[in-house]
Image (cartoon, rainbow, N blue to C red):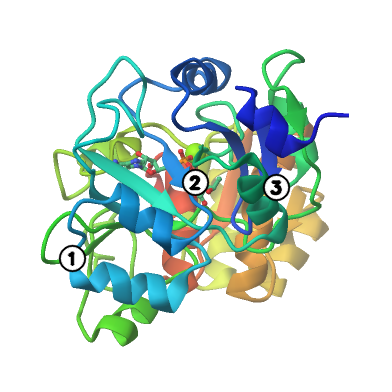
Amino acid sequence: MITAGEMIKNGGLVAFPTETVYGLGADAFNPQAVERIYTAKGRPGDNPLILHVASPAVFFELAQNPPPYAAKLIEAFWPGALTLVVKKNANLPHWLGGHPSRQTDTIAIRMPANPVAQAIIASSGCVIAAPSANKAGTPSPTTANHVKDDFVSGEVDMIVDGGSVALGLESTVIDATSAEPAILRPGAVTGEMINATLGIDIFTVATAFSATNRDKASTSHGNDSAPCAPPRSPGMKYRHYAPKAPMTIIVGASENIAAYIKKECKTSDWQSVGILASSDFLYDFATGEKAKVLALGGTPKAAAQNLFAHLRTFDKLGVSEIYAEAIHGTGLGVAIMDRMLKAAEGRIIYV
Ligand code: TXA
Ligand code: MG
């Protein structure tokens, strides 16, 4: 039987667990294999991929003069949920990191912590290009079954089942192409953790919601009205993580959220209303009304693990509208609210 590492070495596509979400991996230097990733996912060619490496040494071979803080971040957070976007070494293929028909000047690199992921990278002997193993626009997969749900046979050559992932949200992406780092995508390595490591106050480009820019994230603005344009990370401009039913995030006291949902929900049939509850109060309210309710979890860690799976469950339940109770937007909560806002396509209400 062929192993996952051999499959990748031979130009195949392998879905495998990482500590963040499942990835869909191929030999990053094999243009046919990389092109198949784009085709299988339905991913736009201008959205580059993360390169997964076996060690920091490979990072320093691929990157061109990375800034000193990159080495500090690697020291502090690798292996782990941190991706660094850096200038790319001039001797590398012009397309490496992106679609083979394109030119890239930068590459995104991370060294995953999940032992299965590490074993696959090591045994393949490759740098593995791997986006999340979902169809473009669906929530990232946190179990092997999510991957199976998204792809038909032939699109992916092998799925390695490593159980549920540890974190549940994609890695933090840092722009390390200039003297000042910036967060392009918040994740489990939080802004607070980076600040403590580097002794700075890092700027977050991507998120539409955090304790500090809450005012900007007032009612119902879309992704395209995010404060920074043009996007520094191509992935930021695409619709993401969206469940099939329209979702609204509600910020406020749980009692007010319950009252809002009762007033606003479009159908009189609670069975078709999906509620993502982070408080016991809202969970009990939704249960009482016989809505389809899923608990996000009592801690930010649990909420991060549950979010994408719950969005997929709402799709399976066939709800026609989803209301999500906001969580506090600090620490890991910044990344959770970032993904929730993308799922809600920017619809957020304060009550
Ligand atoms: O946790 C993760 O990062 C997972 C696992 C599988 O490692 N991967 C993942 O990949 O989330 P993907 O392709 O779904 O998201 C990669 C993000 C996209 O937003 C993309 O635009 C951005 O990283 N990205 C990749 N290369 C980039 C580059 N050179 N410059 C700026 N952004 C880049
Ligand atoms: Mg993705």
Residue drawn at point x = 42 percent, y = 78 percent: 76
Q: Nearer the viewer, residue 12 or 150?
A: 12
Q: Percent x, y for residue 181?
A: 20, 65
> In the orientation shown, which residue stands out farthest toward the right?
1
User: Residue at label 2?
Assistant: 248
Q: Is the residue at mark 1 in contact range of ligand 1, meaning its CB lies under 8 Å from it?
A: no
Image mark for residue 309: 3
x and y, in percent, of residue 173 in the image:
36, 55
Nearer-N-terminus badge (1/2): 1
Q: Quadrant of the C terminus?
A: bottom left
Q: Is 221 left or right of 272, judged from the image as shown?
A: left
Q: Residues within 10 Å of mark 1 (few under 14, many from 20)?
A: some
- Mark 1 is on which residue type? Pro
Q: Quadrant of residue 193?
A: bottom left
Whether 291 is drawn above or below 7: the answer is below
Q: Amino acid at mark 3?
A: Ala
195 versus 285 height, above or below: below
- Tag of residue 67: 1
Q: Nearer the viewer, residue 350 or 172?
A: 172
Frontmost of labels 1 and 2 is 1
Report if the CB atoms under discs 1 and 2 are less than 8 Å apart.
Answer: no
Q: Is residue 220 shown left or right of residue 23?
A: left
| Residue occupying the point 24% across, 66% down | 213
The quadrant holding residue 141 is top right
Q: Are marks 2 and 3 in contact (CB under 8 Å)?
A: no
